[in-house]
Amino acid sequence: MASSFAALRSHQFQLLWIGQATSAFGGNLQQFALGWLLVQIAVAEGRPELAPLYIGMVGVSRGVPGLVFGLLGGVFADRMDRRRVLVVTRSAGSANAVVLALLVLTGNVHIAAVILLNGLGAVADAMELPLRQSLVGNILPARDLVGAQGAMNATFNTTQILAPLAAGLLIGPIGIGGLLLVSAAASVATVAALVGLAPVAPAHVTDATVLRSLGEGLLYVLREPVLRWVVVLSATASTFVRPLPTLMPAIAENSFHVGATGLSLLLTMSAIGGLVGAFLTVPLGSMSRQGRTTAALVVVWGVGSVLFALQRDFGAALVLAMLPTICWQAFASLSQLLCQAVAPDHLRGRALSLYSVSIAAFMPLGALTVGGLGTLLGIGPAIAIGGVLTTLVGAGVLAGSAAVRRVDLLAGRPRE
């Protein structure tokens, strides 16, 4: 069985791992602070029912940048020094986080400013995923990829537990602006860790235009049956059920009326579920038929979201909040492994960029869709509808794609 410790023996991977840990902690603090800020804006306007819509509007401000710059990130990952581009994008994201914190601290923030700055921050975030995942393939041998994915996902989900708890404790003394300032400081620390990475030679030297390179990557994913269906599954789940943690502020306020403390508990339990899913990475990745497991996780994810949405008891909801994120994290781990292992190095960045777009662009668009539907029908019914749709698509891929059912990274991938 693969071990996370083997990956952590690499100094270069240690730096990348530390950078992700600080970035994830700061990003989760920012998500908590912005979610509660948007709820407070809606309450101050006397329209608390608009909170899901506001969250969706801010989410969709990340969608378009996520679509465009996620694809460009893949092109840059294949044509340039992946380490250098990652340092530049994370530095730009840090500067954006500082500006947002200062606006809130000085009382000059409003919904338009949040939308604008959130969109600018999405540029850096969208480019980061294909760059970071491509770097893992450069730093480590193939035998250590499963363990590395497990280590990074476990760290990411640990921060999802610690950040809401820290935010719940700190929001009283330092306020929303203070939380955003701590988030900005964590982003700066991420840049310091990434600077220590060794340069990486471009994987694909070419005179082709950026658009032609994008087209090559798109055609490859469309023709490769496993990656094609991985992207479809990711896009579906990111649209209809992945926005659940993002919409938690509205759920806490409108469904359970539990305030910031209750929101902290919901997000913490959700993050514990993600940590459990992260720990499943190594055993699931070391088993056969990873493609079949990946599709099955989407089915369970949709069912879990429906169960959570239908719950009216807050205690039971805290327990059920873990199930969707268990499935999400296990799915994310396996799907990223499939992209890394199936795509050749000169196409890996572009393949991962299309995968990242299915998250970075579709998830915010889904937040707007589900959030807007929640304003009309109630947030619970809206999430339940998304869960049903996700379950149907996952079941369809599981039943209809022989390539996905048969894929086995340990024994060699069969083709259609």
Image (tube, rainbow, N blue to C red):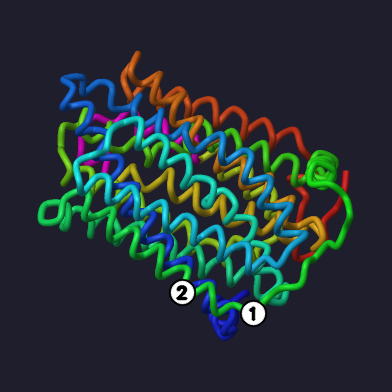
For the N terminus, give its image quadrant: bottom right
Q: Position of residue 217 (x, y in %)?
A: 80, 46
- According to the image, label 2 marks what residue? 192
Q: Amino acid at mark 2?
A: Ala
**Camera-side residue: 28 or 2?**
28
Bounds of the magenta span? 301-318
User: How far separated are the C-alphas under marks 1 and 2?
Assistant: 13 Å
**Camera-side residue: 270 or 220?**
220
Task: Report helix, strand or loop for mark 2.
Answer: helix
Graded by Cα atoms within 10 Å as few (under 14), some (14 to 19) or many (20 or more), the crowding at tag 2 reads: some
Which residue is at 53% across, 52% downward?
124
The verdict on residue 95 being magenta is: no
Q: Choose top left, top right, bottom left or bottom right for residue 200.
A: bottom right
Position of 339 relative to 367 (above/below)? below
Apparent side of residue 376 relative to residue 104 in the rendered image (left or right): right
Position of 195 relative to 212 (above/below)? below
Which residue is at 42% across, 60% downward?
24
> What secondary structure predominates along the stretch shown in magenta?
helix
Task: Please give the label number shown on residue 198.
Answer: 1
Q: Choose top left, top right, bottom left or bottom right for residue 10.
A: bottom right
Position of 407 relative to 311 (above/below)? below
Q: Residue furthest top?
A: 376
Which residue is at 40% across, 70% downward?
189
Task: Report helix, strand or loop for mark 1.
Answer: loop
**Camera-side residue: 312 or 121?**
121
For the C terminus, give its image quadrant: top right
